Amino acid sequence: MKEILIVTSYFPPETGAASNRMFHLSEGLQKEGYKVSVITPLPNYPTGKIFPKYKGKFKTTTVENQITIHRLWLYASNSKNKFLRLFAMFSYSFSLVWFFVWNKIPKTVIVQSPPLLVAFTNMLFLKSKHRKLILNVSDLWPIAGLELGAFKKNFSYKILEKIERYNYKKATIILGQSEEILEHIKTLSPHKETYLYRN
C-alpha cells in the first residue's frame, strides 16, 4: 500500500474551510487505497488556545477512520501582535523538524500553504531528504496580505516573496485552489507542473 503524508496547520476538530478541505483530502486518499498520515498542530483554531482535551500535551497520535493523525505542540495565539503570531508559526515549524528527525517520513508529502513559513520548513527540510513534495496552495501569500493591508511593501515583505518563490521552486507538483492562483504561480515558476484542486 502506498503511503502519503499530509502536513497542514488546520484539521478537525478545528472548524473552517481549511480544516474541512484537508480532512476531505485525507479521507479521499484513504478511500483510494493510500495509507494516509497527517501532521497538524494541537487543535487551537479559531480561539488561539489549545482545546481543553489537548492541554498540557506535547504530542498526540491517534488513528481515526484508518488515518494516523500526529498532533504536535505549538505556541497557540491569535493575537494581533505580529511577533506573537510569527512565534506561533516558528514553534510549529520547530515541532515539525523535531518530528522529521525522529520519525520515518513517506516518500510523498502533501504540504498545505499558507502559512508560508510552515510550508518553507517542509520544503527546506524534506527536499534534502529526497521526498516528492506536493504543495497545496489555497491562498496567495504574501500578496493577499498586502491587499488586505496586513503587509506593507518593505524589507520583510521582500523576504516573504523570496520564501514564496522558494516554496514553488522546491515543490515537485503544485495544486491550486483556483485558476487565479495557478496563473500567479506560473508567472513565478512557468515550468512547474500544476493542477487545479478546488474545495
Image (cartoon, grey):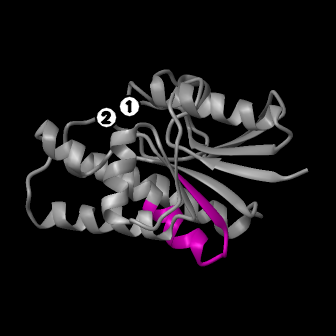
Residue 79, quarter of the rendered image? top left
Say if mark 2 contacts mark 1, CB within 8 Å: yes
The magenta segment: 120-135
**Tag 2, which secondary structure?**
loop
Tell me what residue is drawn at x 65 percent, y 65 percent: 132
Q: Which residue is mark 2?
A: 78
Which of the pair 121/102 is nearer the observer? 121
**Tag 1, which secondary structure?**
loop
Tell me what residue is drawn at x 38 percent, y 58 percent: 117
Reply yes or no: does residue 122 show up in magenta. yes
Q: Which residue is mark 1?
A: 48
Q: Position of residue 74 (x, y in %)?
A: 48, 47
Q: Is residue 139 visible?
A: no
Q: Amino acid at mark 2?
A: Asn
Tell me what residue is drawn at x 61 percent, y 25 percent: 53
- Alpha carbon distance from label 2 to label 1: 5 Å
Is 137 positioned to the left or the right of 38 in the image? left
Q: Position of residue 17 (x, y in %)?
A: 46, 25
Reply yes or no: does residue 48 show up in magenta. no
Vertical position of residue 51 compared to residue 142: above or below: above
Neighbours of disc 1 within 10 Å: few (<14), some (14-19), many (20+): some
